[in-house]
Image (cartoon, grey):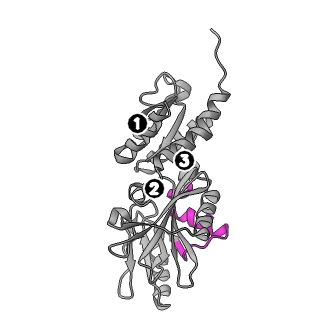
Amino acid sequence: MRIALITDDPGWHGARLRDAFVARACEVQVVSLCDCAIDLVNSPQGLHMPGFEERLPDGVFVRGVPGGTLEQVVLYLDFLHALKALGIPVYNDGRAIERSVDKGMTSLLLQHAGILVPPTWVVSSEERGQRIWARERAAGHRLVVKPLFGSQGQGLVRLSQDDALPALADYQGVYYLQRFIEDQHFDWRVFIINGRVVAGMQRHGKCWINNVAQGASCIAAPKDRELETLAETVTQVLDMDYAGVDLMRDADGNFQVIEANSIPAWKGLQTACDVDIAVCLVDDFCSRYLRRRSRSAVPVEE
């Protein structure tokens, strides 16, 4: 079986996944979506992928989708949609990535499913953002301003009573505003594969941002069935093959979902758990998708 590993930066995660795939007798080719194209003239089934010029891959594992202009991002996601439409398993697929990379859509879908998320606003008007901040400040709340598309804690700003709302232009014309959960100096990252928890940790940040990329320390999380059930439900609502779900407890002791990541990192988590997450991911991908694809293949008679 030949696997396309979609990423611009294989790094530690790519090496772990490659080793796990090779152990299952799969050949891995790293591919950037920047180098892919729709080509209805010269490419098999209309799609050009470096390393798969003669035949498209048997499966696609998505470890990264590059940023870019709206047109570029649409093309990248269209490519993932097209692969799935052609019967090639994509893990996670384009729809799962669309639902989760857009924090506003994630929050909306989860709340409609009855899952607690912090009070959230997504607006493209600076005037409306100012009114929201004025109401929250008057009620004694703090707000977190986040990029609508972003990861690893980058671009987060916490607003306290004397702070001004940042300029809308600093957030690509869209504010994602979320009420800050007070008195919590850590959060939970729960890693889900095929709807089941495989590992979890508490992240204790050096500041109010509990993110490993921002220097947070990782501690194995004690078993908590309420937490695990909630995280599993999140992935069912968003229809993800695998995910990293971030949660915090509010002042009433209830778990609230902060974020759901469809392309989660797990380097920090791996230091706090005794399961090989890359092996778990590859085992699930192969057993659910490649085995089924192999069984359904029809031999060609010469």
**Tag 2 or tag 1, which sits nearer the N-term?**
1
In the rendered image, residue 289, in percent from the top left (x then y), is placed at 61, 38
In the rendered image, residue 287, in percent from the top left (x then y), is placed at 60, 39
Q: Is residue 78 a member of the stretch shown in magenta?
A: no
Q: Note whether 20 is above or below 275 in the view shown.
A: above
| Mark 1–mark 2 CB contact (< 8 Å) | no
In the rendered image, residue 109, in percent from the top left (x then y), is placed at 62, 64
Instruction: Give the number of the disc on residue 121.
Output: none
Answer few, some or many: residues within 10 Å of disc 2's Cα (few below 14, many 20 plus, some between 14 and 19): few
The quarter of the picture where residue 107 lies is bottom right
Answer few, some or many: residues within 10 Å of disc 3's Cα (few below 14, many 20 plus, some between 14 and 19): many
Give the amino acid type for the residue marked by disc 2 in the picture: Asp
What residue is at 32 percent from the left and 73 percent from the top?
A: 206
Give the amino acid type for the residue marked by disc 3 in the picture: Asn
Give the amino acid type for the residue marked by disc 1 in the picture: Val
Magenta residues, as a range? 99-121
**Tag 2 or tag 3, which sits nearer the N-term?**
3
Residue that carries the numbered disc 1 in the rendered image = 30
What residue is at 50 percent from the left and 90 percent from the top?
A: 139
In the rendered image, residue 258, in percent from the top left (x then y), is placed at 51, 69
Does dot 2 land on a helix, a strand or a loop? loop
Instruction: Give the number of the disc on residue 92.
Output: 3
Residue that carries the numbered disc 2 in the rendered image = 274
Q: CA distance from mark 1 to mark 2?
A: 27 Å
Report the front residue among 98 and 244. Answer: 244
Q: CA distance from mark 1 to mark 3?
A: 16 Å
Does dot 1 land on a helix, a strand or a loop? strand
Judged from this view, the residue extending furthest toward the front is 274
Does dot 3 land on a helix, a strand or a loop? loop
Between marks 1 and 2 in the image, the one whose residue lies nearer the viewer: 2
Report the front residue among 283 and 88. Answer: 283
